Image (tube, grey):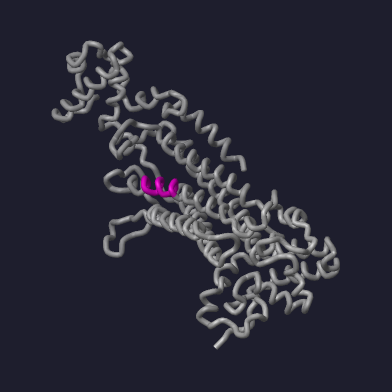
Amino acid sequence: MSTSPTPWSQRFETGLHPVIAEFNASIGFDIALVDYDLTGSQAHAKMLAKVGIISEVEGQQLVDGLEAIRQEYRQGTFTPGVDEEDVHFAVERRLTELLGPLGKKLHTGRSRNDQVGTDIRLYLRSHIKTIRTLIRDFQKALLAHASVHVDTLIPGYTHLQRAQPLSLAHHLLAYVEMAQRDYERLGDVAKRVNTSPLGAGALAGTTFPIDRQYTADQLGFERIYANSLDAVSDRDFAIEFVNAASLIMVHLSRLAEEVIFWASEEFRFVTLTDSCSTGSSIMPQKKNPDVPELVRGKTGRVFGHLQGLLTMMKGLPLAYNKDLQEDKEALFDTVGTVQACLQSMTILLHQGLEFRPQRLAEAVANDFSNATDVADYLAAKGVPFRDAYNLVGTVVKTSLAAGKLLKDLTLEEWQAIHPAFAEDIYDAIAPQQVVAARNSLGGTGFEQVKQALAIAQKMVETR
């Protein structure tokens, strides 16, 4: 049994075995490129007419026919199947049905190799723009909380152990900074995505007098590949994108992990709303943090796609190889996953959680996270810091044994430890003062946080 005629030459006497045809086809997923394929083909048709390979009338007929296919696709009447193999052949076949022999002229001066490379770049360029917009929305959601929680304190952790108290706004602004790097990184990737391979042919260029600069200009590409071999076989831009996407997922997953902790009964730093959480099928008291858990879980998918692309590329000789068909599903799923996770985490921040300032205040008031400030207090009084550090370590040990916090020690107890202690020790170790005192550039001091907040709010308004 064989399938219908193939898009390649009459050198072959029969079609593919049906199972091989299914295995070989990419139409099931590369149909996602149809809009970009049509746009690229329209630019190619205009170029063919411009340089005289076809007439102006023929060029316009091709452009109009391609636009008709776009409308058919949007209306659901253009639905190619496996026998078309890929989106490029599907479009060409339908164009030939609409225009007759003229449709067969469209492929003059190009190959499916440079055609698919063009489509993927157009697709990715568009979606990078969308993802960068979603990053801005995510940052604005973080800033909405930060702007009302400058004076709210939250325990700061190192090694997941209580370390020093922080302004909650300062904590949230750390994620704004991470997202800003993601935004800038994608902008840098977009520069290399925005390079045109169209006209490189299968691998060696073409004998036709094409105008590659014209098609690049028509499609909004900033530059053209200088080497035809590189043009059709390069997927560095795809790997760079998935790497940048992986870092976006790292940052989302880190925040997701914290939200999961914060929502637990052990922390109780946030309350989850009904709109972004689910219940248990057998435990009616539960409210589960499904959104951050899914974000945390989906991170592995994107990491996997990065590893898959790197592995796919590492052994490929020049130029195009069928292996490169595997780039599309990785890219499409990465784009979809990152977009969905950014949207969901933004909604979670806007509507899905509420911070509990009173509970946070209780947390920072009942630990030893002000111990460093006792050492700083002594150092400011002239005691060498390392001596002060060791002294406070002893104080903490004895206080723990006595079931006391540092704030519970009497002035007599403080002065028995060291005569430099005075009444102002209580102000120095009060949580609000502990945070306020850290006013170094980039620190958690309230004045620093207010300045950082103002800078961040201005930053996220730029596109």
Q: Quadrant of residue 54?
A: bottom right
User: Which image quadrant: the C terminus?
Assistant: top right
Image x and y of residue 425, in percent: 28, 18
Query: What residue is drawn where x is 83% and y is 61%?
Result: 51
Pick the residue in front: 79 or 330.
330
Image x and y of residue 196, in percent: 68, 55
Is residue 36 in view?
no
For the view shown, which residue lies furthest in the left direction?
A: 402
**Looking at the image, is 96 positioned above or below residue 316?**
below
Position of 340 compared to 228: left or right?
Answer: left
Image x and y of residue 357, in percent: 36, 37
Query: What residue is drawn where x is 44% and y is 46%?
Result: 251
Which span is picked out in magenta?
A: 250-259
Position of 372 compared to 338: left or right?
Answer: left
Pick the residue in front: 202 or 305.
202
Position of 337 compared to 231: left or right?
Answer: left
Query: Residue 255 colored magenta?
Result: yes
**Looking at the image, is 37 positioned above or below residue 172?**
below
